[in-house]
Amino acid sequence: MAASPLPEIDIEKVRRSCRRRVPDTFKDEVRLEVTVRGRHLSIHERRPVWRGAPGEWTSMPIAQLRYDGDGLWTLYFGDRYGKWTQYFDLAPRQAIDVIINELDTDPTCVFWG
């Protein structure tokens, strides 16, 4: 497997933040998945299909972090059409801790509702 062009420590910080959001008691009802593709790190909320076959899960885009290099990221949110839209309430090219704080506090309610 090829090494990711993204800082591994930043990826782990995002994964840890997502694990903290969903208590173990709800892991059968909701989970947050972090995927890495190229220079993008995406967060999706997954839930079991309401009346689907056992094991089927829906996927809703929550956030995408795009790596700009030099340890800096730009934040995007999943819009109602499933497209990534730049989040303008935070300047682009931020450190990962600033991005995670914005996701955690969600002052505009665009990520977690």
Image (cartoon, rainbow, N blue to C red):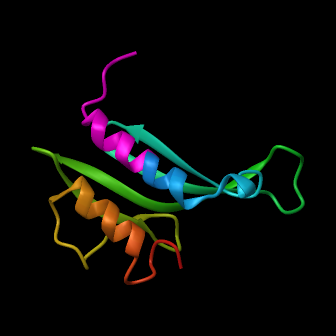
99 or 110: nearer the eye?
A: 99
Q: Position of residue 102 (x, y in %)?
A: 32, 70
Q: Residue at x 68, y 52 (%)?
A: 24
Looking at the image, residue 58 sits to the left or right of residue 92; the answer is right
Is 25 above or below relative to 54? below
Quarter of the image where the N terminus is located: top left
Residue 14: image location, x then y, percent = 39, 49
Magenta span = 1-15
Looking at the image, which residue sits at the far left? 70
**Residue 98 versus residue 42 in the image, above or below:** below
Residue 65 visible in the current orientation = yes
Q: Where does the image place residue 72, in percent across and percent down from the top left?
A: 16, 51
* Figure disc tally: 0
Q: Nearer the viewer, residue 41 or 20?
A: 20
Q: Where 89 sits versus 65, above or below?
A: below
Q: Position of residue 113 (x, y in %)?
A: 53, 79
Q: Quadrant of residue 55?
A: top right
Residue 2 located within the stretch drawn in magenta: yes
Residue drawn at x 52%, y 56% as measured from the top left:
20
Residue plotted at (30% across, 72% down): 87
Side (left or right) of 76 relative to 67: right
Residue 60: quarter of image: bottom right
**Residue found 87% across the figure and 54% down from its top:** 52
Q: Is residue 26 magenta?
A: no
Q: Is residue 39 visible?
A: no
